[in-house]
Image (cartoon, rainbow, N blue to C red):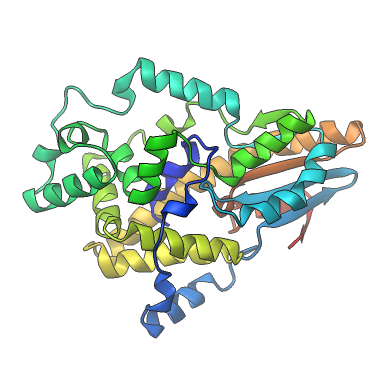
């Protein structure tokens, strides 16, 4: 799970794309010593396994679901489990609700410079020729011609590398990604349960502000080698997700980058720390107030709340579950 996988956070969803995507689980062919190192790296991480959790504090109740942002038929079992809770909940909390996604779409249409740099040097000029040629091919596989990719902002290019070509093609056809987040939103709206956003619609643009030119290019370099086997990468991460082995997803990305990115171990670790700080830890802290305030307000009405967001936000010392525990909530797994 590199920084590039963050692309899925803000893609529109709705229709399934899973049927068009085929790949192999890379754990099946991984050298045993790498698999052992990944397992060792996950040991001791708080709340590292599990997708469904309950947080209680007095009469305050939060049901939390770690989501995967693309379609898969296996989501149905989770949806069936959560549907009755959503129907009775005071509100459903997600990263970005329908209003936020509409605002984001409108902004991107109105101001292409949010994703495209019309004035600065192009990626053709900024990257060595061999890296640019590899990037141009990878972006072409994802439906973006090289002449357009050359002007795209590096953070957006890096994120697109984390989307497998089959998913990119399907989303281009349907305009949607079909993840669990949107299934939960659809369920809530059908039940008349309010949907609340955990963060503003423009959050994604602030996540990458202040990066140095070198950090921008390293984001691309970290994701470029794996872009060639992104379908396999997607299958590997999806299988780990449905197995509930959440932090294994993160460490798989680290060790894959060690082996294949061409960056040094220190460079990979810096990228991983940058990604964790910007994409997870800071946002996790920002979400605690809306969640706890929502739970407190719901408790006054004799209800709880349900929250669904990317599964990697759940575990870890700076994960949402540990932060809620620090606020006095008792955490227990539901799966």
Q: Residue at x 58, y 37 (%)?
A: 95
Furthest-bottom residue in this view = 32
Furthest-top residue in this view = 110
Q: Nearer the viewer, residue 212 or 62?
A: 62
The spot of residue 197 in percent (x, y) is 63, 30
Q: Residue at x 55, y 50 (%)?
A: 68
The spot of residue 126 in percent (x, y) is 12, 40
Quadrant location, the C terminus:
bottom right
Picture quadrant where residue 160 is located: top left
> Image check: 333 left or right of 160?
right
Q: How many marks?
A: 0
Q: Nearer the viewer, residue 97 or 264?
A: 97
Vertical placement of residue 241 versus 28, above or below: above
The spot of residue 137 in percent (x, y) is 18, 48
Picture quadrant where residue 140 is located: top left
> Image check: 41 left or right of 326?
left
Quadrant location, the N terminus:
bottom left
Vertical placement of residue 211 versus 130, above or below: above
Instruction: Inspect this view and state whether residue 58 appears.
Output: yes
Q: Residue at x 65, y 44 (%)?
A: 308
The spot of residue 242 in percent (x, y) is 59, 62
Instruction: Inspect this view and state whether residue 207 appears.
Output: no
């Amino acid at each position: 799970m590199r920084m590039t996988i963050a692309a899925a956070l803000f893609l529109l969803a709705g229709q399934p794309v899973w049927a068009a995507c085929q790949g192999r689980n890379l754990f099946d062919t991984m050298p045993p010593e790498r698999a052992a190192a990944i397992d060792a790296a996950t040991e001791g991480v708080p709340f590292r396994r599990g997708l469904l959790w309950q947080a209680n504090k007095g009469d305050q109740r939060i049901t939390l679901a770690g989501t995967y942002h693309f379609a898969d038929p296996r989501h149905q079992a989770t949806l069936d489990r959560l549907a009755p809770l959503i129907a009775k909940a005071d509100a459903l909390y997600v990263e970005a609700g329908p209003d936020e996604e509409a605002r984001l779409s409108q902004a991107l249409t109105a101001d292409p410079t949010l994703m495209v740099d019309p004035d600065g040097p192009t990626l053709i000029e900024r990257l060595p020729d061999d890296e640019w040629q590899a990037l141009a091919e990878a972006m072409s596989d994802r439906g973006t011609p090289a002449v357009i990719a050359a002007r795209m902002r590096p953070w957006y290019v890096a994120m697109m590398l984390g989307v497998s070509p089959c998913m990119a093609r399907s989303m281009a056809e349907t305009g949607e990604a079909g993840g669990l987040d949107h299934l939960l939103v659809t369920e809530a709206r059908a039940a008349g349960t309010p949907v609340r956003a955990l963060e503003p619609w423009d959050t994604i643009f602030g996540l990458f502000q202040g990066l140095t030119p070198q950090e921008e290019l390293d984001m691309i370099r970290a994701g470029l080698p794996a872009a060639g086997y992104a379908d396999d990468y997607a299958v590997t991460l999806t299988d780990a997700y449905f197995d509930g082995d959440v932090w294994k997803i993160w460490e798989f990305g680290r060790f894959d980058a060690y082996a294949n990115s061409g960056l040094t171990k220190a460079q990979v670790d810096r990228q991983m720390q940058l990604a964790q700080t910007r994409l997870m830890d800071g946002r996790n802290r920002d979400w605690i107030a809306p969640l706890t305030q929502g739970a407190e307000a719901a408790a006054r009405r004799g209800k709880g709340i349900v929250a669904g967001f990317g599964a990697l936000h759940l575990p870890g010392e700076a994960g949402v579950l540990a932060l809620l525990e620090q606020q006095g909530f008792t955490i227990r797994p539901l799966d």
